Image: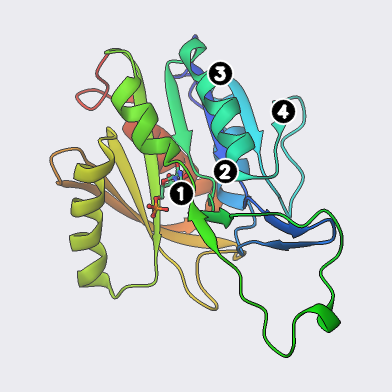
Amino acid sequence: ETKHDLVGKRILITGGGTREPLDPVRFIGNRSSGKQAVALAQRAMQRSADVTLIAAHLEVEPPAGVDLVTVSTAAQMHSEVMTLSPEFDIVIMAAAVSDYRLDTVSGSKLKKVDNGGELHLTLVENPDILKELSSSKSAKQLIIGFAAETATEDDLIRIGKDKIARKGCDLLILNQVGWDQGFGTESNTVSVLASGGDILITATGSKMSVADTILDCIATPPIHNA
Ligand code: C5P
């Protein structure tokens, strides 16, 4: 039976993969399907939260009835998150945001004949939305980040502890990804890290059940800092 333990909570969730255009027809992207974010949005709504989903590119349908904001690039994601987040109690950044964008986007399709056998692209860093949000959040907001890593299990925890300290978020969801793991799959294994670096819980299961585990960590004290 579904608990309605998120009643009155306003939750902003980002999901899917951002795309950085090279020209009008090409982009650099990633293999995030958005399934975990959509499962989080769905379960949070079922647990009576007020949910807005900022969706980059999704391979699945967003939950029926969710407040949906669609974006494509990291810059658009950045602008929507910074504009909308002050109205929310909890922000869950499950999107796979491109760390880089093209320094110049060609206004017309890039042509092989112009490039003599090699195409050199220059990428510049995108703003780190999670880091910026964590440093500007209000005291009663809870910010949750994700870390999708190809590292082995031991390295994963070490990288996670380092990342949560660097980003400054309240919780970090550690997620092993690979060619056939994490992105796009039906099930998932995650560890939830607290800001001090402690592992609160490790869970494996469908993305729906993993979503519930993550929402349990948010709904239940002592982690909630309201
Ligand atoms: O540094 P890394 O990309 O591994 O961090 C992952 C976390 O940071 C995710 O929660 C992702 O949504 C967020 N992120 C961000 N802005 C970026 C890159 C990642 O907010 N430019």
Give the spatial CA distance, label 3 vs label 4: 14 Å
Which residue is rendered at x = 31% and y = 44% of the image?
172
Q: Tag 1 or tag 2, which sits nearer the N-term?
A: 2
| Of callouts 2 and 4, the N-terminal one | 2
CB-based contact (under 8 Å), mark 4 and mark 1: no
* Label 2 CA crowd tier, 10 Å (few <14, some 14–19, many 20+): many
Q: Which residue is mark 1?
A: 210
How many numbered marks, from 0 up? 4
Kindly identify the amino acid type of the residue bearing the numbered disc 4: Leu
What's the residue type where badge 2 is placed? Answer: Ala
Spot occupied by residue 94 in the image (x, y as percentages of width and height):
50, 44
- Of the numbered discs 4 and 1, the one sitting upstream in the chain is 4
Q: Is residue 81 above or below residue 49?
A: below
Pick the residue in front: 101 or 122: 122
Label annotation for residue 68: 4
Q: Amino acid at mark 3?
A: Thr
Q: Nearer the N terminus, badge 2 or badge 3?
A: 2
